[in-house]
Structure formats: structure tokens, C-alpha cells
Image (spheres, rainbow, N blue to C red):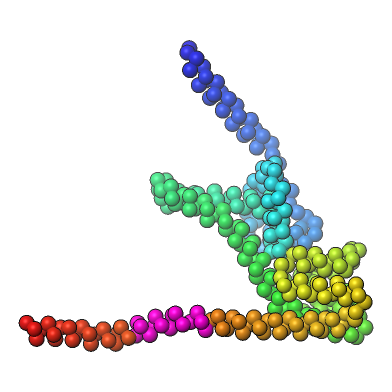
Amino acid sequence: MSATQLTFLGAVTAIASAVAVATYRLGLTPPAPPPRLGRRGLKRHHALGHDARFAASEPTMRYVAGVIAWLPLGGARRRADARIAAAGDYLGLTPDEYFALSVLGGAAGAAAGWLLGGGDDLFLIVAGVTVGAILPRNRVAGEATRRRRQIARGLPPAIDLAALCLGAGMDFPGALRQVTDAAAVKDALHEELRTILRELELGHTRRSALEGFAARVESEEVRDFVAAVVQAEQRGNPLAEVLRIQAEVLRQRRTVRGEEAAARASVLMIGPLVMLILSVLCLILGPLLLRSVAAFAGGGG
């Protein structure tokens, strides 16, 4: 046997051994444990009970997450954890499960592209992998945006009610509890206020609980509210009056944003209106122009 053949045989043996070891190691990897405590545990329990598709795919997702847990993704995990928290701990996902959903989505997209292209269209396969991998990220980002807008809309009246309760002699946790109890709709703001109350009951300071609220919801309205309450606590200002002023400022800001959006909409409508007018003119003048051309051609003939 020549040296080239021996080298080739050794390379094949090494590759086969590496594949066998990797397969054996993957087979021993346990699924990632699901979150059971805190808000993520509650969200996972709710998702498993109300979403049949997620319940069916959850074991596979946890197994892939167990494999991903071996990868050194420190900074990426922190960013993913922040995205999931901003989305209200969507489905009770952990960062590794978030990445696992992208992997599974990419695999499903590749299979769909392979089937649509008959196994020969590389473009469809690559497009399927790309779309499937970014869908979980877009879904989590969309949920975070929805929650942020919902909280921004509901914050001014909630602050007004809290100010009234403080003026009536309640303390800050009691005012927040009154706001949550009086809420007709259990939306994202109600959930965040309940989280603040639970943290206060567990011994967190008011500042840390509110700063956690601002960290979870990246909104200018929430940052201003948290800064106003923390500053009032530090300086000893009357909190009820501070909250009344804050609610009025938030309403004025929302009014200004509405007027700006209306002004932008009127400008954006100019283009479609011009196209519509040109289309109508073409429909009206087109036949007349064609008759004139036909008459001129007939007269010339």
C-alpha cells in the first residue's frame, strides 16, 4: 500500500471516529430543563396548556437547546435574554431555547425549500433557511414592540389613578395594587405592575423594582416615569404631585406624537393621490387621444 493510500485511509478513519464521538456525545446530551419558577415558569406552563403546536415541538426544542448549551455564547446569550424579557418572557423561553427555535426554523425552512425546488434549487433552500432562522427573532421582537406600545398607551391613566390613591393616604405599593385591581383588561401594563408588586413583597427596594421595569420595557415613557418616582424618593418630594405632573407630561407627549403622525400621513398621501389623479386622467383622455390619432391617420390616408 502506497503512502498516499495510507494517508487517505488515516484521514477517513479520523473523520469517521470524530463523527462517531460527536454522535455518541450528542446522544448523551440531556434536554435543557424547562423554566419552572418565576414569570418564565408561569409563561411556559400557560404556553404548554394553550398552544398545541408549541407543546408538540417543546421536547425537540429543549433537546436542541441542551446541545446549544455547550457552545460559548456568553454575550449572545445576554442579548437574547434581554430580548426575551422585553417580550414579556415570551413562551417562557430561555436564551438557549431561543437559539434552538432559530435552528429548528432554519431546518424546517431548508426542508420546505428543498421540497419546493425539487431538491435542485439551491436558492430556495438558502432562502428557506434564512427565513426560517429569522422568524423566531422577528416574532419575539414583534411581541416586544406590541407590549411597549400597550404600556405607553395605558401608563398615563394608571399614573393618574395611582396619584389619586397616594393623595387619599395610601402608600406606593397600595396605590399600585389598587391600579392592578381596578384594571378592566389584564394587559402588559397590568402584568408589569404585578411584577413590581411581587418584587417589593420579596424585599426588593422600590428603586431596584422600578429600574427592573425600565430595563424590561425600553420605552421613553417608562424611563421618565421611573426616573420621576426615584428622584421624588431621593429628594423627598410629594410623590402624588410628581405623578400628576408626569401623567400630564405623558399625555402632552402622546398628543404631539399623534399630531406628528397625522402630518406625516398627509405628506405620504400626496404620492398615491397624484398617481390616482394621473390614472383617472389617462382613463378619460386616453380614448379621446386614440380617436384623434385614428381620425388624423384616416384623413391623411
Residue 192, x across and y down, in percent: 77, 69
Q: Closest to the observer: 221 or 193?
A: 221
Residue 270, x across and y down, in percent: 46, 82
Where is residue 27, by image quadrant? Answer: top right
Asked whether residue 275 is in view, the answer is yes
Residue 53, x across and y down, in percent: 61, 58
Q: Is residue 269 magenta?
A: yes
Identify the residue at image location x=12%, y=82%: 297
In the picture shown, does residue 205 fall above or below 290?
Answer: above
Q: Is residue 126 left or right of residue 67?
A: left
Q: Residue furthest left?
A: 301
Where is residue 82, by image quadrant? Answer: bottom right
Residue 265, x across and y down, in percent: 54, 81
Q: Closest to the observer: 180 or 70?
A: 70
Identify the residue at image location x=29%, y=87%: 284
Q: Which residues are magenta?
A: 266-280
Identify the residue at image location x=75%, y=72%: 222
Asked whether residue 31 is in view, the answer is no
Provide the major secondary structure of the magenta segment.
Answer: helix
Q: Is residue 193 magenta?
A: no
Q: Is residue 19 left or right of residue 77?
A: left
Q: Is residue 37 left or right of residue 270?
A: right
